[in-house]
Amino acid sequence: MSIKGRDIITIDSLSKADIEQVLSNSAKMQSLLEKGKCDLLKGKVLATLFFEPSTRTRLSFESAMHRLGGSVIGFSEASNTSVKKGETLADTIRTVDQYCDVIAMRHPVEGSAQLAADFSEAPIINGGDGAHTHPTQTLLDLYTIQKEKGKIEGLKIALTGDLKYSRTAHSLSYALSMFGADLVFTTPEELKMGKDFTSALKRDFGVNIEEKTKLEDVVSDVDVMYVTRIQRERFPAPEEYEKVKGVFKVDLELLKNAKKDLKIMHPLPRVDEIAPEVDATEHAIYFQQTYNGIPTRMALIAGVLGVEP
Amino acid sequence: MSSEKELKIDKIKSGTVIDHLPAGSGPTVLRILGIDSKWGTSVSVAMNVSSKSGKKDIVKVEDRILQKEETDKLGLIANNATINIVENYNVKEKHHVSPSEEMIGVLECKNPKCVTNQGEPVVTNFKVESANPLTLRCKYCERIMEKELLEEQL
């Protein structure tokens, strides 16, 4: 089943075959991108509706559409729009729907992407709806892993940081389980992945999941380490945060014991969970990961519009 | 001569008999049906009645046919109950209550950050993922409705 005409709201609304198609098309898009000009979506218009701040997601959607030869309209904050006058999201979407062929949206309210999809004829691509989901991040993460490692199945992948609350960690764990990776959740007790979620992954995909509390215990054993931010506000006391922050820092000292081909990923922005000294190592691929947002989003935009590379 | 059962609950001439309700659920069923102290017609509730499959509750309401929203809500708490529509002391129709696959416009999502609680022109929609244990997921924010929050709405 193709993604033509479909909304991309959550990662679990996509089948494994859908995702494989997106990953394959992302690779083709990357070739086109590196060859130069491409007119696959000439005459098509993408609306980027960003109701809250974003650097990477919005700019990479816009860059992706420009690279495909299409045009972009939209806004990067709601304050200059009719939303400020009290317009509902439903009405904003019905209006913008008249002006474009596809909509990429970020909104702070959970479920807003599904609501937009209910009111829009044009396909909606969710660029993050509050604490709910951010499926394009997961797709670009999968593309990055596959590109760097040549496969996903059988890899041992550690996810670290705020696993309890991170939408990125949940969606990625789901997708990696679907693709047969082994997971190592490495996080302080306070930020552990919910038991129900972990059990559901084991039940639905038969995935191997280990749970650890120290990076030192996993660094020598994994192929990919996916780092997310630990947020201060999740901790009841500041000293608890400081304690954990120190332990969950990826630096050269930690990486002494890493596999030579360990790859470190991060959805960015980072604060201090990866020391800048790591950037220059062969392990760091988080900026390539950011770049991969372009071909992945090119594949998604073209895919929902029914255009194959 | 009347049987013991008939002494406990009179037959109704016309209306609805909800049988095989889980023991103890009678008061919740009355709440779902909006039956309170001001209700005008005859209502009988039997609780913890012995039956072949253990204890059960029965609710009989005179001159009352259930609405779809009410049977949807009943399906959440009384899987396998039966609804008997009675006319002239005879059962005219009988069907089993089963949870709907979707609950549309019946329940509120209790996640304050859900788009259904933001003044948008949208009807709530919950997917019933499992009847036992009862698991309802909001179509929009995808949060699972906690059991206590669900019971508040019945």
Image: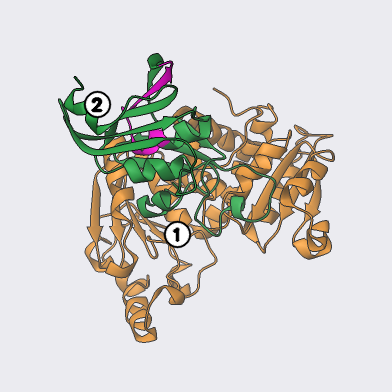
Chain colours: A orange, B green
- The quadrant holding residue B135 is top left
Q: Name the residue located 52 percent from the left edge and 43 percent from the top edge.
A: A139
Marking on residue B87: none
Three-letter code, disc 1: Ser
Left or right of A205 on screen, residue A101:
right
Q: Name the residue located 33 percent from the left edge and 24 percent from the top edge.
A: B11
Q: Please give the chain letter of the residue carrying mark 2.
A: B
Q: Are marks 1 and 2 in contact (CB under 8 Å)?
A: no
Number of other residues with Cα within 10 Å of mark 1, as a class: few under 14, some 14 to 19, many 20 or more: some
Left or right of A71 on screen, residue B35:
left
Q: Quadrant of the N terminus of chain A?
A: top right
On the question of residue A164 being in view, the answer is yes
Query: A9 or A196: nearer the eye?
Result: A196
Q: Position of residue B78 (x, y in %)?
A: 33, 34
Q: Please give the chain letter of the residue carrying mark 1.
A: A
Left or right of A96 on screen, residue A17:
left
Q: Position of residue A265 (x, y in %)?
A: 45, 58
Query: B142 or A194: nearer the eye?
Result: B142
Q: Which residues, given as a range, are shown in magenta? A: B74-88
Number of other residues with Cα within 10 Å of mark 2, as a class: few under 14, some 14 to 19, many 20 or more: few
Q: Position of residue B106 (x, y in %)?
A: 53, 41
> Which callout, 1 or 2, points to the residue nearer the camera?
2
Q: Which residue is mark 1?
A: A166
Q: Is residue A87 magenta?
A: no
Residues indicated by labels 1 and 2 sit on the same polypeptide chain:
no
> Residue pushed farthest bottom?
A239
Marking on residue B6: 2
Query: B152 or A121: nearer the eye?
Result: B152
On the question of residue A205 being in view, the answer is no
Eyeballing the image, is B87 above or below A302? Answer: above
